[in-house]
Image (cartoon, helix red, strand yellow):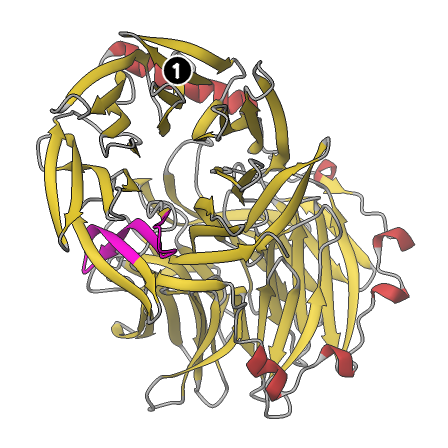
Amino acid sequence: MEKSVILKIFLSLCLIVFLLGACDCGDDDDDDDHIPVDDDDDDTADDDDTTDDDDDDTVDDDMLDDDTVGPENIELVDGGGIAGYGRNIAVAPDGTRYVTAINARDLWLFSAASGKSWEKTKLSWGASLPLVGVNAAGVTTIVFRELEGPLFLLHNEQGDWEKEFVFAAEDNEDIVDYDFALDAQGNVWVGVYTDTGRVIVAVREDGQWQTHQAYDHYDYETRGIRLAVDDQGIAHMVIDCGVYLTGAGESWSAEYVPYALFPRYVDLALDDAGRPHIVSEMTYGYFTYVTGWWDIVKDGDQWTRDQVWAEWNVTVPWVFAVDSGDDGNPVLALKDSAYRLRTYEYDGGEWALGSISDDAIHAKNLALDVVADEVHLSYNDNEAKSLNYAMVDGDNWTETTLDSMAILDDERARPTILLDDGGDVHLIYLCLDEQKYSLRHAYRTAKGWMIEHVADADLHSSHAAALDASGNPVVAFMRDDGDGYDFWITRKVSDVWIEERIYEGDYYRGVNLHLDALGHAHLCGCDGDYSNGDLIYLTDAGGEWAAEIVDADIDYTETCDILLDAEGAPVIAYGKSTDLLLRWQFYLVRKQGEAWTTIFDDPTYYAGEKPSLLLDADGYLHAAYEVWLAHDKFRLRYTTDRSGEWATILVDEPLANVAQPSLALDGEGQVHVVYLNFGKGNLKHAWPDGDAWAYEILDPVGAVGWHPSALIDGDGVLHVGYTGHQALWYLHQDLND
């Protein structure tokens, strides 16, 4: 690697470390690590915050059946695979095994009695992150998140499934993570961490809910919370900034966990003496690979740590889970660098290797439950694309595939939505089919969605699409055939897709496509690696394909957008990095004669990723793009020359992560922007309303809205294609209502 590239990477990492800052965690175990917790009335819920188990909080079977059906204006197009999360496995006293999972936002419960086959039951629509447990009486409890964020509980105490409200975040607050546990009496405990730094504990005892605030301290690095309850009814929690909490009711204490520097992911279990074991990855800095796992134990007032397992530069970090067995000994399961699953048991004050899987398992979302010396695991096999169950008894591994996973990658599918003159909707997107990536075309008919293969592709195949004058799709994409990423175009002619290689490149980045009135193609994309790229413009308007460099001063660009203005000149929107610190800036360039001229730029650092560009009926340009701030906060900006001069407007902030905007114009020339509200995990719609912007949530279910593609038809109906929950979705909404 060239020295200049190494220098750029080094300086970029230094800048990011400076911006992010160090995690505010303790590094020793003296008394100064204890954090005072205010136990006054303001830290606990008042009477109005206590949720009773009255009739309004439960639903009968008929109501539960209604919960399994989604809104009529949201349609599943393709994909939708099974995925498990967190503590999603439990074994009942009679040996029945339960695994919860999400399939295209549907909540499913897989169950198998001892010696019986697995069955599955659909319990709810619009759910995410389902956690499951079974008490000593065999009552199954599931805690999950619904729609925009409230937590709910499902249980079968009376035989039928009943649903109860657990917790909802306050205004301008969101749930970051949650966990739950069952105590020795079968009571349900739910611990919640919010993005304002609050830790809320909700306890269900004798059918009544009591809610208390246990902690209030914001740390932007915190991603998760883990909860366990001991035999005395005392809760133990750890949030992965390294804060340990213990208590019950209105009385809580908090302290920093020593040794837990940069503990990006942690888990928690109690041993037979009631001591907390906090398992954390071993790192020596924010950017280093995991080197193994620590077990950090509190015994009285003292913290100690033990190395469970270590391997330098593990490239498969934070795939692990820990739980306490029937004998009170914690058991740890993890994935090593050979992609094998390992189990370790804590016994007699030491960790000992239990068993290693025979084959490599590309596991994600690992969970375990330990019953009678048997280790029960659930996990997603990322290679086989399946949800799996494994039972480990000694050295014997018994594995079962419960269901298939998705063929769609939410981040890489990147759909383009098109609407033909007959009103039929078309979607072009990338998918994984039988371990091979391909581009697909989905089109909506009276019989439902029809899907066809467009072209072979690979993991990094950037793509874009448009309709020709006959209503047939034209798809531009990049594909590596062994000698670098080349530009390709494929057209559907008489139901046959015809491919053509139009430019031989070295690398890939962000292709986009525009067809003019004569059917000629105009493309933009980046050719080159991360340190030396060129923005390329290609067209066949001259009768044969011609390529030219628009901007040779690019270290890196992710995506671009292109159109022809009112005079027929190509205009390209893109963000680029040109300095040693890889800072982004946003540019709009136009071809004037033989030269490309900048017509607008936003000098704000880290501006311009994933732009969307439109031309209105009066010939004015509109662009929307992301602006990144420190601490993973994003703004969504919009700019236009409609007034005769360029004006830049803030649409929405702060967004917790990428926005990926898509612009659309209605029949009145009003601009609309549809985008991913990543922090809330939903699909959002904004439009100007007087001097301000109006907003609405189009799809509120968590973990949806990736790479939306939007347009508005002549009747004022908004059409959006997007991904979420490993599936492709289509949404339509009448803006006249």
Residue at left offset 91%, top offset 55%: 41
Q: Indicate the quadrant where residue 489 lies.
A: top left
Query: In the rendered image, is residue 347 in sight?
Result: no
- In the depicted structure, whether residue 41 falls above or below residue 68: above
Measuring 38% from the left and 73% from the top, which residue is drawn there? 375
Residue type for callout 1? Val
Q: Quadrant of residue 142?
A: bottom right
- Residue 429 among magenta residues: yes
Left or right, 181 with reference to 539: right
- The quadrant in which the N terminus is found is top left
Tell me the residue at 88%/65% (across/down): 48
| Residue for point 26% across, 42% down | 469
Q: Dot 1, how many residues are within 10 Å of its Cα: few (below 14), some (14-19), or many (20+)?
A: many
Residue 78 place in picture, x, y as percent: 33, 62
Give the quadrant of the C terminus.
bottom right
In the picture, measured across the screen, residue 14 lies left or right of residue 669, that is: left
Magenta span of residues: 418-442
Report the magenta stretch's main SS.
strand
Residue 202, percent from left and from top: 73, 66
State which quadrant residue 565 falls in. Answer: top left
Q: Which residue is mark 1?
A: 589
Q: Where is residue 3 drawn, in percent x and y? A: 26, 10
Question: Is residue 290 highlighted in magenta?
Answer: no
Residue 186 appears in the picture as rendered? yes
Q: Position of residue 520 (x, y in %)?
A: 22, 30
- From this view, report whether residue 388 is shown above or below residue 419: below
